[in-house]
């Protein structure tokens, strides 16, 4: 299922990972793990945030995806099923 991951990292913790040089490695490893169709990095709600769209094949993947972000970045993590335009058209067509 196409899934949007939103991870807002704790500012103090992410400041430390930038200072000690571990932030780039963590981000790269998360991206390699998820093989996303898109990954964006921005500031939201006053903190460093990543938005990653990837295919989550099974809900049992959630701990492997989220725990690293919880532990290493003290991130607030959200996972949302999402659709692209083709998915929306297919879903709307099924209504009628």
Image (spheres, grey):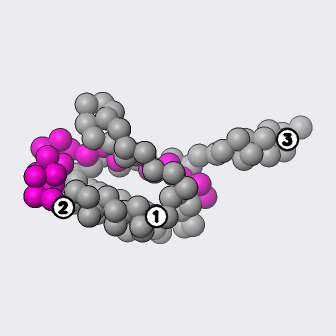
Q: Quadrant of the C terminus?
A: top right
Q: Which mark is residue 34?
A: 1
Residue 56, visible in the rendered structure: yes
Which residue is found at the position 47% from the left and 69% from the top?
Answer: 60
Tell me where residue 45 sits by quadrant: top left
Q: Nearer the viewer, mark 1 or mark 3?
A: 1
User: Could you say where residue 40 lies in the image, as x and y percent from the top left?
Assistant: 43, 45
Tell me where residue 30 sits by quadrant: bottom left
Q: Is residue 51 left or right of residue 81?
A: left
- Extreme residue toward the right, this view: 96
- Asked which secondary structure carries label 2, the reply is loop
- Extreme residue toward the top, this view: 45
Q: Label 2: how many residues lie within 10 Å, few (<14), some (14-19) or many (20+)?
A: few
Which residue is found at the position 35% from the left and 38% from the top?
Answer: 42
User: Mark 1 vs mark 3: which is more N-terminal?
Assistant: 1
Looking at the rendering, the stretch of residues picked out in magenta corresponds to 1-22
Q: Quadrant of the N terminus?
A: bottom right
Q: Which residue is mark 2?
A: 22
Q: On screen, 66 above or below 16?
A: below
Tell me where residue 33 sits by quadrant: bottom left
Residue 67, visible in the rendered structure: no
Q: Are marks 2 and 1 in contact (CB under 8 Å)?
A: no
Q: Label 1: how many residues lie within 10 Å, few (<14), some (14-19) or many (20+)?
A: some
Q: Is residue 87 left or right of residue 33?
A: right
User: Could you say where residue 27 lies in the image, as x and y percent from the top left?
Assistant: 31, 58
User: Mark 2 vs mark 3: which is more N-terminal?
Assistant: 2
Q: Distance of mark 2 from mark 1, alpha carbons?
A: 19 Å
Q: Does residue 38 show up magenta in the picture?
A: no
Q: Does residue 21 show up magenta in the picture?
A: yes
- Asked which secondary structure carries label 1, the reply is helix
Q: Distance of mark 1 from mark 3, alpha carbons?
A: 30 Å
């Amino acid at each position: 299922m196409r899934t949007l991951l939103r991870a807002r990292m704790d500012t103090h913790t992410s400041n430390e990972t930038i200072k000690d040089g571990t932030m780039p490695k963590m981000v790269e490893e998360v991206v390699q793990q998820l093989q996303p169709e898109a990954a964006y990095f921005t500031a939201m709600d006053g903190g460093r945030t990543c938005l990653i769209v990837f295919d989550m094949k099974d809900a049992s993947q959630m701990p492997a995806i989220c725990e690293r972000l919880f532990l290493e970045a003290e991130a607030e993590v959200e996972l949302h099923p999402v659709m692209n335009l083709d998915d929306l058209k297919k879903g709307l067509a099924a209504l009628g």
